Amino acid sequence: MACDPIHMIAEPLTGKISVRASGGPISAQAKRLIQPKPKAMRNFLICLMLAVPLAGCGTMLPKQQAGAVPAWVLSPPADSREWFWGVGEGPELDAAKGAGLKDIAARLRVSISGQLDSQVTVDNGKVDRQARTRISEQVQKTEFSHYVVEKTAQSADGFFVLVKLDRQAFIRDLKDRLGVLDAHIQHTAAGLGRQTPLERFVSLRRIQPDLEEATGYAQLLVGAEAGGMGAARLREYEALRQQVRQAATALVFHIQARPEDQDLAEAVGTFLNESGIRVESGQGGGNSLAISSGAFADEIYGSKLVRLKVTLSVRDDGGRALASRNYEVSGSSAYDYSGARKSALRKLLAAMREAGPAAALGFAE
């Protein structure tokens, strides 16, 4: 027997179900079978109405709390003779590891500063104003090796990392690097007593870059191992740095120039005085600085141009040529050639300042 389709329609407010058949009336028995009980339907609708608002509020519920911070983050292991310890956090493990190494560097910087403060007291309060700058720069440039990632943990923003650095391996690396520089410095320092003031000035200027770098390594050693080799080298390097400052004041140059180049002589003299070197005019004993030049004038679109070719020649008190350097500078003026020449002299002075006192005179740094 074929059955016609049956349609059930629920009224929204009452929950009553209307039953219809597309093919004709439905029997009473069929209606009793498919008509739900009013109480059960009402309970179903109440649950449905309560569930819909709660589903929409899901995003308003509090987020799950992050896990507890590990104890080693809040209280990392203390540095020991074998290890430096550092804790870092970052969005990725590599970033967290880098932060952990920076933590080691920061505490190493504090340790160095404390050691130097105690040395300043011992050395009658003599303070090197650039010392702290050198500490920061040297520690920042240091690339740590011989480290191990000891522990990791997830954090609210990524990862925590506990890093340990092999202290003794770090010290060995520092001593090896310092040893290479120190050998050159000690060799130069041994010959200073046999040199003339000019030769001593040049020698000290030449070792100054190595002296600065070696000072940085010695400071790191002071922080890594209290006292010892680092502290002894720092005292020696400070004495050499004092000689560098005094070497210029022991020099006297007699500037020799043509009358038409007196403005050149004044510019060079200004530079030497700024460097702590005394200057005298005309002939005399001691070191001489001869200035020769060629000037070329031109005019382009109404602007006056002057190009200067300048040669500085250094001779000792025996007339022996020690160094020389050539410069070529140009200046311009909208009014006259005198103004253009002054512009060229300003550029010459700027070039000498950039080179430094030894290199500006032709001595290789």
Image: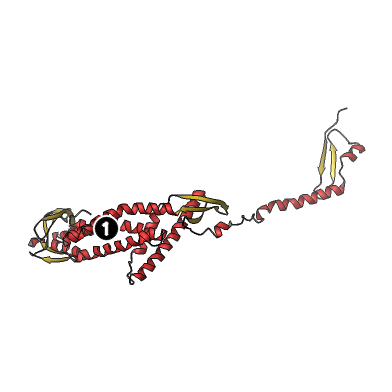
Quadrant for residue 210, please give it: bottom left
**Label 1 crowd bin: few (<14), some (14–19), many (20+), radius 10 Å:** some
Q: Nearer the viewer, residue 14 or 119?
A: 119
Q: Nearer the viewer, residue 342 or 211?
A: 211
Q: Nearer the viewer, residue 70 or 269?
A: 70
Coloring applied to the structure: secondary structure
Residue furthest top in the image: 1
Picture coordinates of residue 199, whole percent (x, y): 17, 58
Report the number of numbered marks. Answer: 1
At horizontal 80% and vertical 51% (from top left) the residue drawn is 46
- Asked if residue 364 shows in the view, the reply is yes
Q: Is residue 50 left or right of residue 273?
A: right
Picture coordinates of residue 263, whole percent (x, y): 13, 63
The residue at which mark 1 appears reads as: 208
At horizontal 43% and vertical 63% (from top left) the residue drawn is 111
Name the quadrant of the C terminus.
Answer: bottom left
Query: Which three-letter amino acid code belongs to the residue tagged 1?
Result: Gln
Q: Is residue 360 left or right of residue 35?
A: left
Picture coordinates of residue 73, whole percent (x, y): 55, 57
- Asked if residue 275 shows in the view, the reply is no
Q: Is residue 55 left or right of residue 196?
A: right
Residue furthest right in the image: 28
Q: Is residue 248 above or below residue 302?
A: below
Name the quadrant of the N terminus.
Answer: top right
Q: What SS does tag 1 mark?
A: helix
Picture coordinates of residue 77, whole percent (x, y): 52, 58
Q: Is residue 192 left or right of residue 54?
A: left
Q: Is residue 42 above or below residue 74?
A: above
